[in-house]
Amino acid sequence: MANNGIIVGGVIATAAIIFAVFVSFNAITDNGTGELIVTNGNHAETIGETIGVVKSYDYSLIDIFEKSEESVVQVNVLRGESDGGMGSGFVYSEDGYVITNQHVVRDAQKVTVTFLDGESYIGEVIGTDQDLDIAVVKVSPSNTYLQPIKIGDSSKLKVGERIAAIGNPFGLSGSMTSGIVSQIGRLLPQESGYSIPDVIQTDAAINPGNSGGPLINMKGEVVGINTAIQSATGEFSGIGFAVPSNTVKKVVPVLIENGEFKHPWMGISGTDVDPELAEVRGLKSSKGFLVVSVIEESPAELAGLLGVTETKEMDGREFALDGDIILAIDGKTVRKISDILVHLQREKSIGDDMVLSVNRNGEMLELTMVLEERPR
């Protein structure tokens, strides 16, 4: 059966691949011209609900900028004699840790961090996570007071809530844009083949050079790291994405301590149930995730999950006639793959148990899985 779906713990989305926004330049040939890397197509699943009432704001946009600007930095990178780039970042702690995107510092031979006062310092990449597009850079400034910005709770964000983005678009340092939270719980595919779950969608303008900068709520707290846009034209079209701050809070301390973050892993691939598959299988609902294949000796195989062994072609499409359908994890309904990935990211670590509620050819089963480290 053709696998039109996704790999759990390594999700490959069929709808769109979205690459990060980053100013890249060749110091010899193009004199700093920005290049926007985007992709075409529609995006994946929506998770989260629209809230009609937006709570009152604690600060004005002017207040937000004045409160935050000292914490936002410019990150310049050299990858060779001529290749380099520029992104943004923000101060995480007073002892010199700065957060940015992994793609900003990828393959960097030299990293320079510039602060609001104009002082620049050499940065050392302490830890990175390619799959979540997060990096930590360490600086030791001698003349600059480091002003960390508070990390907020991204799980409290509501659709329609006002936010602001601060960064260095096209090298224009300390630039601010504003907008709203357009949606929460997006799934953002990465070049690595994995996907970032629980991503924030915003209409605040994000352009080349904004990568790694903070997305800030109206309390002046970081709720995300500006990471990517989606566009069919190569220009900002009102759809930007940010890695949620709760992911930052979970991952960054581990990156500082160990240089890497180890992800929990299930070891299955599959596809979301849709109305056509539900009809063929005689299901009452089109919710759930169909397990297409199970990796040998993976947590999924040890838990007893079964993949597809029998298919049938109908109207030009191949349908799975068997294979477990995951309907819930730890008592939480699984509508789409996004629900599984968000649960893994928010709640689970390597070695944790996870209880799966499964439909196996009409029989309801509960299977317990012990999560292992994701293979590299």
Image: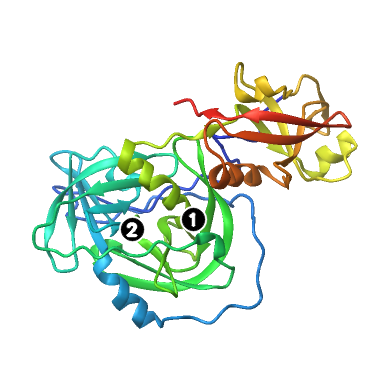
Identify the residue at horizontal 77%, vertical 29% (top origin): 324
- Is 247 situated left or right of 267 in this image? left
Quarter of the figure that contains the N terminus: top right
Identify the residue at horizontal 52%, vertical 32% (top origin): 350
Q: How many marks?
A: 2
Amino acid carrying label 2: it is Pro
Across and down, in percent, residue 300 comes to 65, 25
Q: Is residue 333 above or below residue 301?
A: below
Q: Nearer the viewer, residue 186 or 326?
A: 326
Q: Secondary structure at mark 1?
A: loop
Q: Nearer the viewer, residue 181 or 372?
A: 372
Q: What residue is pinned by disc 1?
A: 230
Across and down, in percent, residue 292 comes to 70, 27
Q: Secondary structure at mark 2?
A: loop
Q: Is residue 250 above or below residue 59?
A: above
Q: Quadrant of residue 265?
A: top right
Q: What residue is pinned by disc 2?
A: 208
